[in-house]
Amino acid sequence: MAKKKKKKADKHANAVVKAEKSLRKAQKGVTRAAERLAALVGNDGTPGKTGSAKDKPRARRAAESAPASGAPLRTVTQLRERAKAEGIRGYSRLTKPALVAALAK
């Protein structure tokens, strides 16, 4: 009987150790996120300057690397709505490049 109690106690102790480890890992992640945010925003609340691409939001990086053709980039949903309005058949199965090509005609 004592062996069963010891085994159960060891099992619970291992679970506590794992939970503490997970907590430390989560706290580290939150700290890193807070540091990245602090680097992006200055003390006065204005955006700071960073050279790292990791710190920039994905949409902003995409806009910066977009071709300067003057045509606005659209989402697939927007392109599909426009294709539907123009009466293009099979628009729901088309990929983004195919939608752009079909709408350009």
Image (cartoon, rainbow, N blue to C red):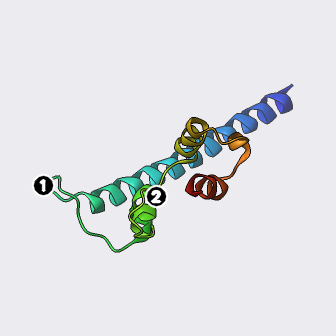
Tell me which corner region of the image, top left, top right, bottom left or bottom right, holds residue 104: bottom right
Look at 17% across and 52% down and name the residue there: 45
The residue most toward the left is 44
Nearest the camera: 52 or 7?
52
Left or right? Give the position of 61 relative to 78: left
Q: Foreground: 104 or 16?
A: 104
41 relative to 23, above or below: below
Q: Amino acid at mark 1?
A: Asp
Number of residues whose C-alpha sits closer than 10 Å to that of mark 1, classed few (under 14), some (14–19) or many (20 or more): few
Q: Quadrant of the C terminus?
A: bottom right
Residue 40 point in image, percent of width and height: 29, 60
Question: Where 20 falls versus 97 (above or below)?
Answer: above
**Residue on which the image places disc 2:** 58
Q: Dot 1 lies on which element?
A: loop
- Residue 36: percent from the left, percent from the top? 36, 60
Question: At numbered mark 2, what does the secondary structure look like: helix, strand or loop?
Answer: helix
- Single out the residue that lies furthest toward the top: 1
Q: Quick one: quadrant of the N terminus?
A: top right
Expressed as whole percent of the image width and height from the top left, the position of residue 63 reads 41, 62
**What count of labels does the image hold?**
2
Name the kind of residue labelled 2 in the image. Arg
Rendered residue at 60%/37% (across/down): 84
Residue under pointer 1: 44
* Mark sitting earlier along the chain (1/2): 1
* Label 2 environment density (alpha carbons within 10 Å; few <14, some 14–19, many ≥20): few
Q: Based on the displayed image, in which of its 4 quarters is residue 47 positioned?
A: bottom left
For the point 80% across and 35% down, the residue is 7
Q: Position of residue 70 (x, y in %)?
A: 38, 64
Give the quadrant of residue 13.
top right
Using the image as rendered, state which of residue 23 and residue 97 is in the foreground. 97
**Residue lying at 46% horizontally and 58% vertically, measured from the top left:** 58
Q: Is residue 91 left or right of residue 100?
A: right
